[in-house]
Every structure is written in C-alpha cells, then in structure tokens.
Image (cartoon, helix red, strand yellow):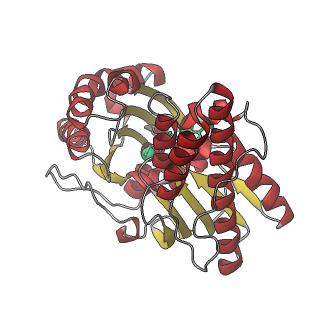
Amino acid sequence: MRVLGIETSCDETGVAIYSEAEGLLAHQLYSQVKLHADYGGVVPELASRDHIRKTLPLIQAALKEANLSHTDLDGIAFTQGPGLVGALLAGSSIARSLAYAWKLPAVGVHHMEGHLLAPMLEDTKPEFPFLALLVSGGHTMMVAVKAIGEYEILGESIDDAAGEAFDKTAKLLGLDYPGGPLLAKIATQGTEGRFKFPRPMTDRPGLDFSFSGLKTFAANTIAKEGDDLQTQADIALAFEQAVVDTLAIKCKRALEQTKMKRLVIAGGVSANQRLREQLAVMMEKLNGKVFYPRTAFCTDNGAMIAYAGLARLKAGQTLDLAVKARPRWPINELPPL
Ligand code: KG4
Ligand code: ZN
C-alpha cells in the first residue's frame, strides 16, 4: 500500500509518499517562514493562500521524486485538524478532490497523531505501549499510548504551549519568528548559573504544564538587567534549562505513574538538543529508552501524515465525499484502529 500524505495545518506545506513495503519514498516541504517573518508570527490568511499555491506543485514533485504516477497510489491522507481553519481547508479541499478524481480512498489525519507517530519513520522505533511527550508550537501534552488511536491524555498545558513559550521569549530577546531554534542557538553562548528561572508547577502533584510565567520572568529579567548580547545569551540559557527541566520532571513523574519504560518525544520542540540529551541521560538512569524523529520530522511535515494515514486506511477508515476541517479536535476522540 502506498499513501500520499498532505500537511497544511499551519505555516508549512508538506507532501510525502509512504509505502508499507518500502518505507518513505518521497518527502517535499515548503516552509512559509519568510512569508510571515515581517509580522512576527503566522498570518492565517497569507498561510491559506500560500498552501493553495504550493500544494499541487509539491504533489507533482513528490510523485517525480518517487518515480511514480498517481495510478501507483492506494490512498490519500491529509491533515484534517487541529490547526488554522483556512490552512486546513486548503489542504482538505485539494486532497479530497484529488482522491475523488483519482478514485482513491481518502482519510483525515489528526496533526498531533502525526507528530506522535513520527518516530515510526526511523530505524529505531518504539514498541507499544509508550509514553509520549508532545511539544509543538500549538500543543504540550503528556499522552499514554497503548496503540494507534488509544490515547490517554495525562496532562497538558493550561496556557502557552512549550514552543509558543520559546517563540514569545525569543521575541522578547529580539529574535525572529519562529524563535525556538534561534533561542537555543544563542543559549549555547550563555553563562551557566547567572540566572535561575522557576520550574513551573513542579512543586505540586499532577502532570499539567504552565509556561506563560517563564515569558514574564524573562521580560522582567530583561527590564532589570538590560539586553546586551551576553545577557541575552544568559537569559536564553536559563529559560531553556527551565523548560527542559520542567518537561523532564513531568516525564519522570508520568513514567513512574504509568510504569512505562519507553518515552517518545515529538513535535517541533523535540528538535531541541538540550531536551534530547537530558532525557537520554534520564532514561538511561531509569533503565528505559527515549525515541524521537530525525530533526526534519520533529517540525511539521507530510511524512508523518502519510504514515498515520496509511495505518488508518489499512484499517479501513475512510472519509465520505464532504470536505471537513476540524480546527479543534481532542486527540483522545480518535477511534482505535
Ligand atoms: O510541530 P511544529 O512544527 O508546529 C506545530 O505543530 O506547532 O512546532 C514548531 C515549534 C515552534 O514553536 C518552534 O519555535 C519550536 O517548535 N522549535 C524549537 C526548536 N525547533 C523548533 N524549540 C526549541 N528548540 C528547537 N531546537
Ligand atoms: Zn505540528
């Protein structure tokens, strides 16, 4: 079975072809980062228009990369939610119409399920069950994963998502959008121990997160200490350490609670080097193992959508002919396979 995957939930147009027998056959990505840069964040209307421009050419490029024609495909998977409604509708309309024209089954994929399954695209994949820490620009979630579609949300952010906190703090430090990777880069020049940021919500039981206070802490620190280059790097380091520590403390707690030994991290922030290293050390101490996607598949991409879509199409889950987007879609409402 070969599935075309289409991702258009936010500011990246991703198209990929995944084969059950041969693995990933093509992966094309167009990032809109430059388009939104002047605005300091994603402008939904511009994002939708750009997905309309880019999706079909990327599909053609993916077919060419895989040396396939559309007649070699067995289904089309697309991101149906959660995300920006216009962006989702652009991808859904194109995907659903192509599937109709090409007489293929279509399936709508949950964007966070895509992220959660992205480590399955790697050689070392986790076996079920596992604990998943999903950390993206829009969501922060701790999920107990029994199997595909069997998700129990153990905790989530009550305010900003981890990636959002990175981006907002980066903005305060004068960095461009999306600032997460840029903040991580300047943090490597930071002085260890100059500033100490709080570890929010770690002093009480539970697995929920709160990151908006860290941004305020950063703003206050900048106001007090100034923002010369070294101070910026020192603040970036202290902020990154606080986020990573907080995520690690909650992962440890969730692992103890669920008695699981495998931890998956996925979503844009799982590209963060400090997070990966700290969790690797922690998992070794706990006699467990951490799994994550390659950097290109931590952030939004079509490959994870093709993979998740293939699993659901194989189980016979298909969509009717209507074009429907689900901008809000709790992951625990997904059906099992
Ligand atoms: O998963 P993703 O591409 O989009 C959403 O579904 O939201 O995640 C993007 C987020 C952005 O907030 C970005 O700043 C963050 O992931 N990010 C990082 C790093 N790379 C991407 N945050 C911290 N360190 C990184 N290396
Ligand atoms: Zn995402």
The spot of residue 199 in percent (x, y) is 64, 62
The spot of residue 297 in percent (x, y) is 54, 39
Q: Is residue 126 left or right of residue 136?
A: right
Q: In terms of depth relative to the viewer, which is nearer, 73 or 149?
A: 149
Q: Is residue 114 left or right of residue 56?
A: right
Q: In terms of depth relative to the viewer, which is nearer, 99 or 145?
A: 145
- Label total for image: 0
The spot of residue 38 in percent (x, y) is 34, 23
Residue 293 visible, this angle? no
> Does 325 sit above or below residue 9?
below
> Does 57 sit above or below residue 269?
above
> Does 113 sit above or below residue 57?
below
Q: In terms of depth relative to the viewer, which is nearer, 276 or 296?
A: 276
Q: Residue at x 33, y 60 (%)?
A: 317
Where's ligand 2: which quadrant? top left
Q: Is residue 77 left or right of residue 259?
A: left
Q: Residue at x 35, y 60 (%)?
A: 316
- Residue ranking furthest to the left: 322
Residue 161 visible, this angle? yes
Q: Quadrant of the C terminus?
A: bottom left
The spot of residue 300 in percent (x, y) is 45, 39
> Does 3 sit above or below residue 286?
above
Q: Is residue 283 left or right of residue 334?
A: right
Q: Residue at x 35, y 35 (%)?
A: 41
The quadrant where residue 37 appears: top left
Q: Quadrant of the N terminus?
A: top left
The quadrant where residue 33 appears: top left
Q: Residue at x 42, y 61 (%)?
A: 159
